[in-house]
Image (tube, grey):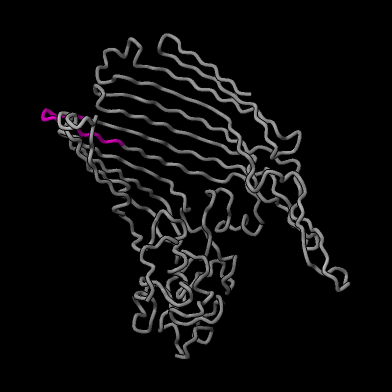
Amino acid sequence: YVYRVGDTYDGKYTVEATGRYDGHFAFAPGKRYAYFPAFSAGWIISEEAFMKSVSWVNYFKIKGSWGKTGNLVSGGDYQWQDSYNLNNNNYAFGLGTLLQGTSPNSQANAALTWEVAQKTDIGFESVLFKGKLNLEVGVFKQKRSNMLTDPQTVVSKEYGIGLSQVNAGIMESSGIEITAGTQHKFANGLQLSLNGNFTYANNKLIQTFESAATFNNANRRRTGRPLGSQFGYKSLGLFHLSDDKNGDGIINAADGYNVTQFGTLKPGNIKYADLNGDGKIDANDETYLGFNPSPLITYGFTLAANWKGFDASVFFQGAAKTTIGTQNFLTVPFSNNSSNTGYEYYNNRWTPENDMNAKYPRASSAPYSNDTQGSDFWVRDGSYLRLRTATIGYTIPSLVVKALKIKSVRLYVTGQNLLTFSKLKFIDPELSGGNGSASNSGT
């Protein structure tokens, strides 16, 4: 069931309470139903007598809310029940005959229940300077609990199937949201308006099951970091011809390099930092690579103008404090049907002639596994500002179109994604992983 009650007193004070008692077959009997309440309150300060003398404040309201919401588990609706795969045409017990049978697909977890989010918002909304400025600011804090995560238990391969997920993850997030707008009409009839928004939102995992190998290594620890954080190796650039001291084309201990990486190393391959100093590059050398693909900051603004039937508007959208990985056509040459490589990679790859200025590793039809490892070598700043839409229009005067028995006519031209300001010149910054290159032409 659902309820909603509220009241406004004296035109100044508002309160509201809502709630729902919800159930879903995604959970086992006894775990299906949960109660999710929410409360909010507001105070319109501008209606108080002591604010009447503040002429530049036309409207000002302080507001706050708290609420609890529930999310369904990911990965399917019947995880509380055992499931099986139907296998056809398999040999059994050496009979030499193809038989049909079943095998366990997943282990049930009848204790699964709702993922719960508790969110608190505090802020204000206002109209200032005789309506010329609208400003709304809100800060929020949210705690998500009962998030699905893999159990912190290891079972032998003989068990046959993996353990089911459990409601054990906890994540906290916080941030600020700002929206503002202003408009002005000049004496000559020109009208201008500017509206914008800004959001900063960060999160961190308070509790997540991870192995002792990652938790006890400050560089690899997932707990306390944002959800979706990227981990990998720290790169030290490319090997150069000068690293091949004996001139045999291979870089190893004979050249004074005593760190084992991935396969045979040559000039033009990526060099990694041996963070734990054990003489080999492996999972123990992974480290946090920085901001995750979900931006901490998002923003946008719209500028519009109207004058004597003409109108124009532009909408910009952007993001900051984010990184993306440059995958595919930059990391793997000849990845396009095994025949072509990206123009950007080809022109900036390592060659003996480009030993000191190369941006990318040496090219090979059989790419070195050393160079395709996850590392900060392939991580880029994903910040951008994009002209999302731009429109120019003209509305024909009503006196002209009335003669044609038409109510109104507006002619306009609009464009989308016309400009992008970004350090990424060959990758669409909105496509995580760098798979959206507009310049993936073969050479």
Q: Is residue 191 magenta?
A: yes
Q: Nearer the viewer, residue 59 or 387?
A: 387
Q: Residue furthest left?
A: 188
In-image side of 149 versus 409 (left or right): right
Q: Is residue 116 above or below residue 235?
A: above
Q: Which residue is farthest front?
A: 404
Image coordinates of residue 134 in percent, x first then y, are 31, 28
User: How far across and how far down the image is residue 281, in percent?
Assistant: 56, 71
Q: Quick one: 290 or 292, which is closer to the camera? A: 292
Q: Which residues are magenta?
A: 184-195
- The residue drawn where x is 33% and y is 62% is 425
Q: Quadrant of residue 307?
A: top left
- For the point 40% across and 36% down, the residue is 177
Q: Quadrant of residue 70?
A: top right
Of residues 42 and 274, which is closer to you in this image?
Answer: 42
Q: Nearer the viewer, residue 60 or 4?
A: 4
* Residue 170 falls inside the magenta stretch: no
- Quarter of the image with the C terminus is bottom left
Could you tell me which residue is drawn at 59 percent across and 66 percent down? 283
Residue 217 at x, y percent in the picture: 59, 58
Q: Quadrant of the N terminus?
A: top right
